[in-house]
Amino acid sequence: MDLKKFWLPVFIGILIFSPCDAANSRNSSAKNWSKSLDATFPEQLRRGLRSCATVASPGEGGVCKILAAMDEQLKILAAPKNRDPPPRNSCKFKSDNGASLHRYATDRSPALQALLDRYSAMHSACVARDHDNLHHIIAKNTAKITNPSQCRYIVWSCTFGLGNKLMSLVSTFLYAILSQRVLLLEESPSWDRLFCEPFIDSHWKLPRGLSLKDDQSISFPDFYARCRGRLARSDACRSQPVLPIVFSANTKPEEHRFLVCPSAMASVRNIPVLNFRNSNQYFAAGFFLNPSLRPILEAIFPERRVFHNLAGFLLNPSDEVWGSIQSLHSMKFRGASRRIAVQLRESKGDYRDYYDASVPRCIRSKSGLCPIEIDEFLESKNKSIASDDYIAVYVASLVGEHAAKLNASLRDVESQTGQRFELVTLGADEEQRDDVDHQQRALVDIWSLSLADVLLTSHMSTFGYTAQGLAGLTPYFLKPWRDDPCWPSVSSDPCFHFAPSKKLSCREDGFSLSGRESGGAAMACPDLPDTGMQLLEPP
Ligand SMILES: *[C@@H]1O[C@H](CO)[C@@H](O)[C@H](O)[C@H]1NC(C)=O
Ligand SMILES: *[C@@H]1O[C@H](CO)[C@@H](O)[C@H](O)[C@H]1NC(C)=O
Ligand SMILES: *[C@@H]1O[C@H](CO)[C@@H](O)[C@H](O)[C@H]1NC(C)=O
Ligand SMILES: *[C@@H]1O[C@H](CO)[C@@H](O)[C@H](O)[C@H]1NC(C)=O
């Protein structure tokens, strides 16, 4: 990729609001989005919103409103009768404080913590009341969707690989919180073998036997075209029980309105079930383009580490997976003076030699070795390689030959730097497969990568994105075809590969993305500048 191709879209590509840009964007950002936000809450949950009117900042005011709406939902559900004391879910990862191994982790903001606490309470209360009736709530013909006390749901399913799944799941969870909807998974039972249940006294499974995979409801763009604004009062719009939402490489601009346009969010507020079906994108970043959500998101994620903060809550490895992570970690990682992790993705699954020279070069230049020490070492040639200190290099690849080659070339790096290197690997799987054992191994690989101090990953890989997001580390992308093969990314948050284009307009809301300038919140992804969008951490 040549330099011009990279920088041009950075300047003209994905653009976000700023209070201090050109005059026309000042006008639109000065617009009071408070009303637009209020319209996104369903009528029955609006009672508490007034109490937030005294909060001056739009971000904190918005958080206050979301909390108030969840409170209202809890009030409506008050004291379910005959509720058995729920079993408490145990999770070794949590009781061992496994998260403490992420040394570059950032705490959740108080706003996010408050939202997660309130969301969890709402989730548990809704699941306790509705779970056995979800068949009726969802089944089209018997839908009693006029019941105003009803909780609203999101059903998520995804058949892509693990990395894609996690991009889409974390994004969906963000929307669930913002829209006060309960997130349920339509997944094979094997999910339990990957992750612990995130909701301590509840669960997030769609009832067995219930599936929305074949649901034939009209698409979001058709619904929005038919039901936005005043038309939303028509019966057809009010009785839509399920609406599918999909973000993939083929997503059309009209579908991106779901993320960007406040009126689109308002149009779906009364639909009982949103069906997030087979998305493979990290669309969480796209909500930052929505002017009524943007201040709220900035308040919840002051460092814009959206994936990192949400995954820290949602993704806790199962006991089985955690056991494997721990044993790898204690074998070679814990004692190392520095940890480097390398992820080598081969799209065709075949070994190619083009990483062979570049990866050792990147390890030498990016592992934080001090050049002065290396010079001294080279001058006194007969000094033996440093004592007990060593640098651990974790290699994750489906192709076993990569680990063997890298291990051999690390011996050269040793003689060039005077440092001892230990290669750690889980072993190759040879092909991407989707049975549970392979997914468990993939998760161990992702987690081990995320425990590094320096992360070298293949660009465009959602596997690598997951590791960088969990770690809170900005990775280097391996680009062996370049002179400088270790290309730094711009943040730890993943890239939204196929993000809304600058041409997108929200007519109902009176703005389009083209009129807006970057406020430094996001830029084109270094690894997919033409269509990708990535959040930046504030300076
Ligand atoms: C911005 O708003 C002011 C008044 O609020 C108006 O006079 C001006 O024309 C607007 N500028 C643009 C570029 O829309
Ligand atoms: C925005 O509008 C709401 C209600 O319409 C009002 O209470 C609030 O004070 C306004 N905020 C600003 C900054 O004008
Ligand atoms: C190198 O090793 C030899 C013998 O082990 C020793 O005599 C010599 O002083 C060493 N040189 C340096 C520069 O340390
Ligand atoms: C890497 O090479 C060293 C030295 O040749 C060897 O002792 C070690 O077992 C190898 N490690 C792996 C993981 O293959």
Image (tube, helix red, strand yellow):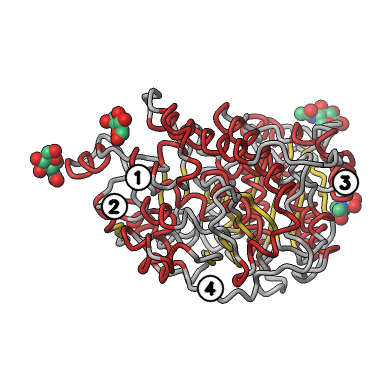
Residue at 27% across, 40% down: 29
Amino acid type, label 3: Asp
Per the rendering, the mark at residue 217 is 4
- Cα separation, mark 3 vs mark 2, equals 48 Å
Where disc 2 sits, the SS reads helix
Mark 2 burial class by Cα count in 10 Å: few <14, some 14-19, many 20+: some
- Write down the quadrant of residue 372 in the picture: top right
- Residue designated by label 2: 509
- Residue designated by label 1: 36
Q: Nearer the viewer, residue 64 or 256?
A: 64
Work out whether mark 4 precedes mark 2 in sequence or the reverse, and give the earlier one.
Answer: 4
Mark 4 burial class by Cα count in 10 Å: few <14, some 14-19, many 20+: some
Mark 3 burial class by Cα count in 10 Å: few <14, some 14-19, many 20+: some
Per the rendering, the mark at residue 319 is 3
**Residue 483 appears at what percent x and percent y?**
51, 56
The answer to whether mark 2 and mark 1 are in CB contact below 8 A is yes
- Cα separation, mark 3 vs mark 1, equals 44 Å
Amino acid type, label 2: Asp
Work out whether mark 1 precedes mark 4 in sequence or the reverse, and give the earlier one.
Answer: 1
Where disc 4 sits, the SS reads loop
Amino acid type, label 4: Ser
Quadrant of the snapshot with the N terminus: bottom left
- Cα separation, mark 4 vs mark 2, equals 26 Å
Q: Name the mark nearer the viewer: 3 or 1.
A: 1
- Cα separation, mark 1 vs mark 4, equals 26 Å
Residue at 70% across, 64% down: 135
Quadrant for ligand 2 reads top left
The answer to whether mark 3 and mark 1 are in CB contact below 8 A is no
Amino acid type, label 1: Ser
Where disc 1 sits, the SS reads helix
Vertical placement of residue 11 versus 499, above or below? above
Work out whether mark 2 precedes mark 1 in sequence or the reverse, and give the earlier one.
Answer: 1
